[in-house]
Image (cartoon, rainbow, N blue to C red):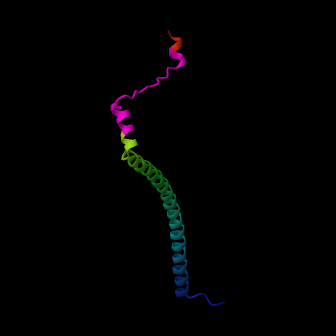
Amino acid sequence: MPDAPRIRWIIVYAVALFLVAVSVVTFFKEVGRIERLSMALGSRMEELVVIMRKNQDLQEKISYYKTPDGIRRLAIDQFNLVKSGEKIYRIVIISDDALHEN
């Protein structure tokens, strides 16, 4: 009769197999977590780009409204102020639907 494996070797192999199984499961969970974090980071980066573009547009408007032309445009648009002798013409577009109702 061949020698039966000793009990301590069976325990060593069982512990080693258990550690390998735990390591593999942990590895795949971490890979999934990394993928989720990468996707979240990508969406946050897209939001950041949109906010930075909006910020840049607002900075350009601020720079424009600090110039004499910008101040003039703001005075005309918001307060209907003009220099003496100037006239403002506003064009109001009426749709065809409103014209046919009369």
What residue lies at 66% left-to-right and 90% top-to-bottom? 2
Farthest residue toward the right?
A: 1
Q: Looking at the image, how many numbered discs can be counted on the residues?
A: 0
Q: Please name whichever residue, 57 or 46, is drawn nearer the observer in this view of the structure.
A: 57
Q: Position of residue 102 (x, y in %)?
A: 50, 9
The residue located at (51%, 72%) in the rendering is 22
97 magenta-colored: yes
* Residue situated in front as seen by the camera: 76 or 5: 76
Q: Residue furthest top?
A: 102
Quadrant of the drawing holding the N terminus? bottom right
Which region is colored magenta? 72-98
Residue 60, horizontal then vertical, whole percent: 43, 49
**Residue 35, percent across and down?**
53, 62
Residue 72 on image: x %, y %? 37, 38
At horizontal 52% and vertical 14% (from top left) the residue drawn is: 99
**Left or right of 95, for residue 78:** left
Q: Is residue 89 magenta?
A: yes
Depth order, front residue of 80/15: 80
Asked if residue 14 is positioned above or below residue 74 in the image, the reply reads: below
